[in-house]
Amino acid sequence: MKGKVVEVFESYQGEGLYFGQRQVFVRLFGCNIGCKFCDTKVDYYFECEPEELFKKIVPFKKSYRFISFTGGEPLTQKDFLKEALILGHKHGFKNYLDTNGTLPEALEEVIAEVDIVAMDFKLPSSTGEGNFWEQHRRFLKISSIQDCFVKAVICLSTTEEDLRQALKLIKEGDHNTALVLQPNSFEPQKELLEKVSRYQAICASAGVVSCVIPQMHRILGIM
Ligand code: SF4
């Protein structure tokens, strides 16, 4: 089965708890939502079978341990993704899934082949989209059988109410899940840093481990 792939490249992981790690990235085409701060909307891709995709990935095998499947939203192509994840393991890689956390049914079909779930919390006051609380709740539950951490972009528009709802869902699931707060890099950083520092105190009082990690790929100008 053919998948739609935007690009395969090597770079530093620019977000979350694995920030700074060298990884092989597979960017899949298409997303099911439209965040106002999205920087990965593209209208080009190439089509290929999973085996053809791996002809591009295998040369990285000696130097890289992780393949990061990203997008777009990789789970919008769950059948292609599943075959690619299986091939990733067959070739000795660890599979890192960067996902918007809104497609729990698709995740359920691939979770056995994922090693690390890097899940976004799409806070409605940040994204400008509707809320995905129910999808996030189910997604977190399924993810808890593997290593999982959660990221949330914090904008000037983000509300404390949304943060508290996210913390509630984290507490309902695996209590060890860490929350990464990401100041929106398109907005004034000084004001946002004051805000995330306040939000970290709220996380601590809710018993959720949090850290502030900017979206470094934008700051450093890497992919
Ligand atoms: S989920 Fe990610 S790829 Fe999709 S619109 Fe939001 S930021 Fe863009």
Image (spheres, helix red, strand yellow):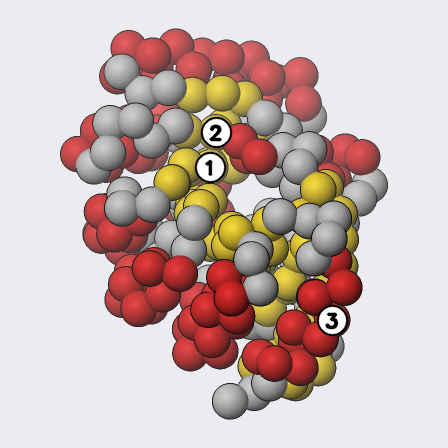
Label 3 CB-ligand 1 distance < 8 A: no
Establish if 182 lies above or below 124: above
Q: Residue at x 71, y 75 (%)?
A: 55
**Residue 128 left/right relative to 148:** right
Q: Position of residue 174 (x, y in %)?
A: 24, 34
Cα separation between marks 2 and 3: 31 Å
Q: Residue at x 37, y 19 (%)?
A: 209
Label 1 CB-ligand 1 distance < 8 A: no
Q: Amino acid at mark 1?
A: Lys
Residue 43 in view here? no
Establish if 92 lies above or below 144: below
Name the residue beneath numbered marker 3: 56
Q: Is there a contact, CB below 8 Å, between mark 2 and mark 1?
A: yes
Q: For label 1, count other residues whose C-alpha is less than 10 Å away and answer few (under 14), some (14-19) or many (20+).
A: many
Work out whether residue 87 or residue 186 is closer to the camera in this orientation and state it: 87
Establish if 24 lies above or below 85: above
Question: Mark 2 or mark 1: which comes first in sequence?
Answer: 1
Work out whether residue 128 or residue 18 is closer to the camera in this orientation and state it: 18
**In what element is the residue under mark 1?**
strand
Name the residue beneath numbered marker 2: 180
Q: Is there a contact, CB below 8 Å, between mark 1 and mark 3?
A: no
Q: Amino acid at mark 3?
A: Lys
Q: In this view, which residue lies farthest toward the bottom?
A: 1
Q: Position of residue 166 (x, y in %)?
A: 30, 34
Q: Position of residue 83 (x, y in %)?
A: 47, 75
Q: Amino acid at mark 2?
A: Val
Name the residue beneath numbered marker 1: 151
Cα separation between marks 2 and 1: 5 Å
Work out whether residue 81 or residue 129 is closer to the camera in this orientation and state it: 81
Residue 29 in view here? yes
Cα separation between marks 1 and 3: 29 Å
